[in-house]
Image (cartoon, helix red, strand yellow):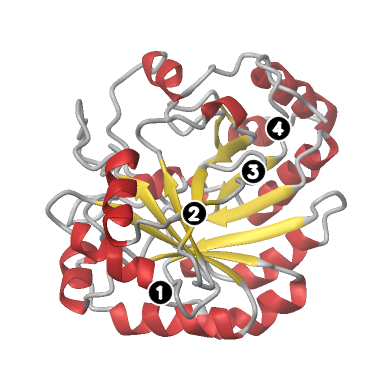
């Protein structure tokens, strides 16, 4: 197992397979979308498989497929089957918006996918359209229950946005009453592709938690899993649980075991950095697996302490879209 310069093990890879998405959520990208890259700029499946294989030899055992929306990329299921067969990868999960997911549920079960993160910011159809700019609520909501019925560990990711969906915090929490689902409320982050930056976040993790407690004063704290990004709770008598993720406040960095690889091959040792090197270019230059392994070890030993240090070290202010960095 490889450790970074702060003694944190690197065991978890978030692998973005595409920069494309079939939604236009305003906190993730501009309404017109982003300028999608030519296929030649993206890592090929073969390059991704080779990279994951090398990382597995260094101790990475968990891979989460992200996008954009992963299922908009052609032959995604075949690629996932190949990923699941890499020696050392013991956990393969996916984050999706649910629009195309239902048709692949059987195959995901077959290959051993246990957990699916589903993006759903509201239970109101009108607000869904206002946030996502696409009329797809019914499909996403249907997918949620298809996944639960199939026995997946489902986490619903809801970004909490001032003036947009704070009224959905309690209705989303109520989903945990009769469903074994985790509802995770996430602080909004400055990755909407328009250079937004928030010197002050009105709806931070403590305020989100206070809103939940206002309705459920007996809310119980759960024991958080190792390396968890969420602070987890349960309403007494409810089947599911609730998590709050301080993604902008960045209070969980001390136990972070994650790295990211964008669809274009940029390696990010922190969500807030601007990429420490490009793996796609290294592979296409003819680097050997041993040279690639040494490169990984070197950059892991120069990892920022937290997201604030990573942001300070950037060469430019944050202007990228979350869909381009594996949101």
In depth, the one of 21 and 160 nearer the eye is 160
Q: Distance between the residues labelled 4 and 1?
A: 33 Å
CB atoms of marks 2 and 1 within 8 Å: no
Q: Mark 4 points at which residue?
A: 10
- Which one is in front in this view, the residue at disc 4 or the one at disc 1? 1
How many numbered marks have been drawn onto this rendered protein structure? 4
In screen coordinates, is 137 left or right of 83? left
Q: Distance between the residues labelled 1 and 3?
A: 29 Å
- Residue 206: x, y in percent? 32, 39
Decide: is 268 above or below 22: above
Q: Name the residue under label 3.
A: 13
Q: Mark 1 points at which residue?
A: 175
Q: Mark 2 points at which residue?
A: 220
- Residue 176: x, y in percent? 45, 71
Q: How far apart are marks 4 and 3 (CA)?
A: 8 Å
Q: What residue is rendered at 55% in x and 74% in y?
A: 180
In depth, the one of 107 and 7 nearer the eye is 7
| Neighbour tally class for label 4: few under 14, some 14-19, many 20 plus, Cα within 10 Å | many
Q: Distance between the residues labelled 2 and 4?
A: 31 Å
Q: What residue is rendered at 74% in x and 68% in y?
A: 81
In depth, the one of 308 and 231 nearer the eye is 231
Task: Please tell me whether mark 4 sits on a helix, a strand or a loop.
Answer: loop
Hey, which quadrant is residue 60 in on the image? top right
Q: Distance between the residues labelled 2 and 3?
A: 31 Å
Q: How far apart are marks 2 and 1 (CA)?
A: 16 Å
Which is more N-terminal, label 3 or label 1? 3
């Amino acid at each position: 197992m490889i450790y970074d310069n702060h003694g944190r093990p690197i065991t978890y890879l978030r692998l973005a397979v595409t920069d494309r998405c079939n939604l236009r959520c305003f906190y993730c990208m501009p309404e017109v979308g982003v300028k999608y890259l030519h296929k030649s700029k993206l890592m090929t499946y073969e390059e991704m498989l080779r990279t994951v294989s090398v990382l597995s030899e260094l101790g990475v055992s968990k891979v989460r497929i992200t996008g954009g929306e992963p299922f908009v990329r052609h032959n995604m299921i075949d690629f996932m089957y190949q990923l699941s067969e890499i020696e050392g990868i013991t956990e393969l999960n996916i984050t999706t918006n649910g629009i195309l997911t239902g048709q692949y549920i059987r195959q995901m079960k077959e290959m051993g996918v246990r957990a699916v993160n589903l993006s759903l910011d509201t239970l109101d159809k009108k607000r869904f359209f206002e946030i996502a700019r696409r009329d797809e609520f019914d499909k996403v909501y249907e997918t949620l229950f298809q996944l639960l019925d199939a026995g997946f560990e489902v986490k619903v990711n809801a970004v909490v946005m001032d003036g947009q969906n704070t009224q959905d915090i309690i209705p989303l929490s109520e989903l945990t009453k009769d469903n074994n689902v985790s509802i995770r409320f996430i602080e909004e982050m400055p990755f909407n592709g328009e250079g937004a930056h928030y010197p002050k976040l009105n709806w931070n993790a403590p305020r989100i938690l206070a809103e939940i407690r206002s309705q459920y004063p007996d809310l119980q704290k759960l024991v958080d899993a190792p390396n968890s990004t969420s602070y987890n709770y349960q309403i007494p008598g409810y089947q599911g649980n609730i998590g709050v993720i301080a993604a902008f406040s960045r209070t969980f960095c001390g136990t972070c075991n994650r790295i990211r690889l964008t669809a274009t091959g940029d390696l990010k040792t922190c969500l807030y950095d601007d990429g420490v090197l490009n793996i796609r270019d290294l592979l296409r230059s003819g680097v050997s697996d041993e040279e690639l392994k040494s490169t990984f070890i070197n950059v892991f030993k120069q990892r920022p302490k937290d997201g604030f240090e990573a942001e300070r070290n950037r060469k430019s202010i944050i202007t990228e879209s979350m869909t381009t960095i594996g949101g």
